[in-house]
Image: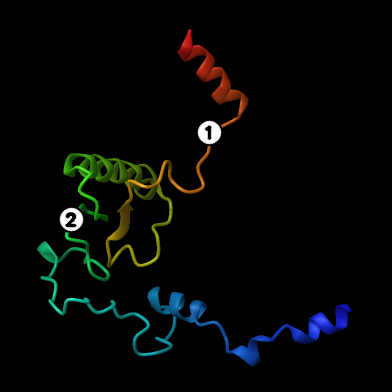
Amino acid sequence: MLPLLVALIPTASAVGDCGTPAVLAALHDAGPVPFAHALTAPARLDGVALPPPPGGGKSIYGSPYSMHIETDNFTVNWWDSSIHRADAEAAADALEVAWNSYVDQGWVAPVSSDRYLLWVLLDPGWAAPPGTRPSTSPTSSARATRSST
């Protein structure tokens, strides 16, 4: 049975090579652009061109939602009127603090973040950010015990 399964799995040459490594190399100016539209922002659906970023800063890759704010490194977008602008601003401020805590202290910035703002979507339907869960480490338990007494 195993030889049959192996025979059914297509090889890279049968389905074409993955273009991701070549695109990432082009983003870092370490290789040629693999195809013309690889580094082009998607067209706006409404056909209206975005104004250039103020002061020659980073631009938005794609079309922002009607409700959005920009910081030095992020575009924070939301579509639900139950999200208040003040909450979006608080999220944006926290993101900039995180950026300063990591990137400005030597962590590698995300690919293309030197040219484009990083997208953040605020969705009131998420109870918690995907992939998060309460910590069960002994340190967090000790902290929780100390803070409740």
State the CA–CA distance, disc 2 to disc 1.
Answer: 31 Å
What percent of the width, then of the height, locates residue 97? 30, 41
- Classed neighbour count for the residue bearing mark 2: other residues with Cα under 10 Å, few (<14), some (14–19), many (≥20): some
Tell me which residue sits at (26%, 71%) in the image. 62
Residue 134 is marked as 1
**Dots 2, 1 in contact, CB < 8 A:** no
Residue 67 is marked as 2
What percent of the width, then of the height, locates residue 136? 60, 30
Indicate the colouring scheme: rainbow
Q: Is residue 86 or residue 1 the one in the foreground?
A: 1
- Classed neighbour count for the residue bearing mark 1: other residues with Cα under 10 Å, few (<14), some (14–19), many (≥20): few
User: Farthest top residue?
Assistant: 149
Q: Does 20 sit left or right of 112 as displayed? A: right
Q: Quadrant of the N terminus?
A: bottom right
Q: Mark 2 or 1 closer to N-term? A: 2
- Quadrant location of residue 142? top right
What percent of the width, then of the height, locates residue 79? 24, 55
Instruction: Kindly identify the amino acid type of the residue bearing the numbered disc 2.
Output: Met
- Quadrant location of residue 11? bottom right
Tell me which residue sits at (75%, 85%) in the image. 8
Instruction: Kindly identify the amino acid type of the residue bearing the numbered disc 1.
Output: Pro
User: Farthest bottom residue?
Assistant: 14
Q: Does 18 sit left or right of 3 as displayed? A: left
What percent of the width, then of the height, locates residue 120? 32, 55
Q: Does 141 sit left or right of 57 as displayed? A: right
Q: Establish if 108 lies above or below 101.
A: below
Q: Secondary structure at mark 2?
A: strand
